Image: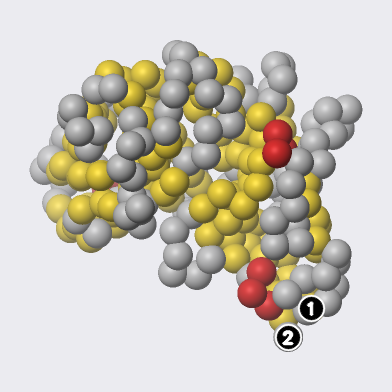
Amino acid sequence: AQRVTQPEKLLSVFKGAPVELKCNYSYSGSPELFWYVQYSRQRLQLLLRHISRESIKGFTADLNKGETSFHLKKPFAQEEDSAMYYCALTSPSGGSYIPTFGRGTSLIVHP
Amino acid sequence: KAGVTQTPRYLIKTRGQQVTLSCSPISGHRSVSWYQQTPGQGLQFLFEYFSETQRNKGNFPGRFSGRQFSNSRSEMNVSTLELGDSALYLCASSPGASGTVGDTQYFGPGTRLTVL
């Protein structure tokens, strides 16, 4: 069975500092990984996905199959990055793909 | 396009009652998924519907059920409510073409269910 682990419940940094939110996964197949974000009083939304290899709002994430990780990084944190971040893995099932979410990491960026 | 909408936004029920939650997906989206979010367990997948058929189901008891209508709107029902069913229930829609890996899910605001 697949599993997604986000070891940090809370990450607190100062504005301008680098940020790395950790995500480790356990899955025997070829994973599809995502990061979702939930800002205060907003709904959960997709931040980025590894198949797109994109950078969104300065965030990047690289899939490391050897370490089974998909850490989210940003070189210089901004106060508006404060939010709850969820790592998710999708696996094929029943003709579609269902996601398994990590427990989430709350990022607080102090001024 | 209008986003995913969920009704009601808040609900208070007592143990033993049943509840029905509603989700209207983004226009054109055919897949609707339901999740339960709690502080203890995080986001857990309940089930997914596509073209009025349940395509996937998570590890929840049979008290949790759902359905999807021809216009892709979906409802989920929880019967014989227990205190532990208190949670935020999220609905998400996606275009849902079969076999589409990495389909982005668009989430609704959720329904906050409190069971007393």
**Residue marked by disc 1:** A14
Query: Quadrant location of the C terminus of chain B?
Result: bottom left
Query: In this rendering, would A26 be left or right of B69?
Result: right
How many numbered callouts? 2
Q: Is residue A5 visible?
A: no
In the image, residue B33 above or below residue A108: above
Q: Is the C-beta separation of discs 1 and 2 under 8 Å?
A: yes
Foreground of the two, B101 or A94: B101
Foreground of the two, B63 or A57: A57
> What percent of the width, then of the height, locates residue A4?
65, 36
Residue at image point 58% right, 31% down: B102
User: In which quadrant of the rendered view does residue B21 lie?
Assistant: top left
The subunit letter for the residue under badge 2 reads A
In the image, residue B9 above or below residue A31: below
The subunit letter for the residue under badge 1 reads A
In the image, residue A109 above or below residue A4: below
Residue at image point 45% right, 14% down: A94
Query: In this rendering, would A31 be left or right of B57?
Result: right
> What percent of the width, then of the height, locates residue B12?
18, 58
SS type, badge 1: strand
Residue A27 marker: none
Q: Is residue B52 visible?
A: yes
Given the image, on which type of amino acid does mark 2 rest? Pro
In terms of sequence position, does the residue under pointer 1 or pointer 2 come before the other? Answer: 1
**Residue marked by disc 2:** A111
Residue at image point 36% right, 31% down: B31
| Mark 1 surroundings: few (<14), some (14-19) or many (≥20) residues within 10 A | some
Given the image, on which type of amino acid does mark 1 rest? Phe
> What percent of the width, then of the height, locates residue B3?
35, 53
Residue furthest to the top: A94
Residue furthest to the bottom: A111
